[in-house]
Amino acid sequence: MKQEQTLSLILLLGTAFVQTTRAQMVVLHMADNKTFEYSISQLDSISFDEHEWVDLGLPSGTLWAKCNVGAKLPEGSGNYFAWGETKPKSNYSWSTYAYCKGKAKRLTKYCTNGNYGNDGFTDGLTELLPEDDAATANWGEKWQTPDSAQLAELFDSNNTRTNWENRNGRWGWLVVSRHNGKSIFMPLCGFRADGDYYDVNTEGCYLSRTLASEISPLAVYYQDINREGFKTVGSYRYCGYSIRPVRVKQ
């Protein structure tokens, strides 16, 4: 890396650049008052992650994003995704779903029952592959859609407590860690089916990356949240749901 490029990146990071008799050092001053020093020769590159996350101290080590995919604020709806699709669209139905031949029982991917597969097709896949994960496709390889266990862990009363809040006109739950007091806001963004929006500001539907084959070969798990509380449910994969990405500690 060229020295002038390194200097500009260091300034953006708010670090100090120190000249010593032996080497040029990058000194990182962290929010907890710790400092870390690195020689320029140790650095290959410096990268910036534009998506903020929160460590809630959960047993699994899961780190939760502050915003939904497609949103710029925690209370924003962001985009809606059919399960396994990586781009939003105007119409959410079996006729437009990427992994079927226009009908519910003609699946072409993520099928565990030949009665629901196109010409008896099955592949046994029960979790999204990275190339079909909207969180990964839109935010990068460090991110993914949470699985059903991660969503359940987030709302487990042993791990978090919840406060009902309104932020800029959007109702939702502030989920506060019992381990370290940090929090994320989960707004009620509703869902999409056909060309319409449903239950915005009365229900939140947070997609998992896990099929709900026990319920139906056509169903996926999502976390349903509303004023009354939260639960893991299964519903048709063609509908458009919110995605709150997760990543794991490095």
Image (cartoon, rainbow, N blue to C red):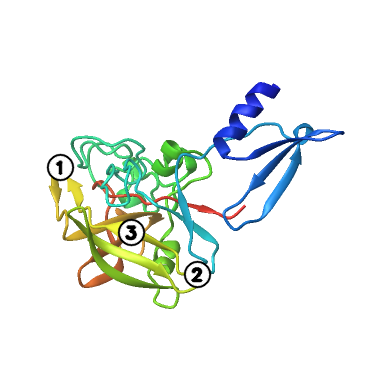
Is label 2 in contact with label 3 (beta carbons under 8 Å)?
no
Q: Which mark is residue 180?
A: 2
Q: Earlier in the sequence, mark 3 or mark 1?
A: 3
Q: Please tell me which residue is depicted at 31% across the width and 58% down the height of the picture.
A: 186
Q: Which amino acid type is marked by label 3?
A: Phe
Q: Residue furthest bottom?
A: 158
- Which of 14/190 is in front? 14
Q: Please tell me which residue is depicted at 74% across the width and 45% down the height of the picture.
A: 37
| Quarter placement of the N terminus | top right
How many marks the image carries: the answer is 3
Q: Residue 104: x and y, percent?
A: 24, 46
Q: Quadrant of residue 150?
A: bottom left
Does 232 sit left or right of 209 as displayed? Answer: left
Does 105 sit left or right of 156 as displayed? Answer: left
Is residue 202 positioned above or below 124 on the image? below
Is label 3 in contact with label 1 (beta carbons under 8 Å)?
no
Q: Which amino acid type is marked by label 2?
A: Asn
Q: Label 1 crowding class (10 Å Cα cut-off): few <14, some 14-19, many 20+?
A: some
- Which of 139/14 is in front? 14
Mark 1 or mark 2, which is nearer to you? 2
Q: Which mark is residue 78?
A: none
Is label 1 in contact with label 2 (beta carbons under 8 Å)?
no
Q: Earlier in the sequence, mark 2 or mark 3?
A: 2
Helix, strand or loop for disc 2: loop
Q: Which mark is residue 194?
A: 1
Q: Residue 40: x and y, percent?
A: 75, 33
- Gap between marks 1 and 2 measured at Cα: 41 Å
Circle 3 is placed at which residue position?
185
Q: Quadrant of residue 100?
A: top left
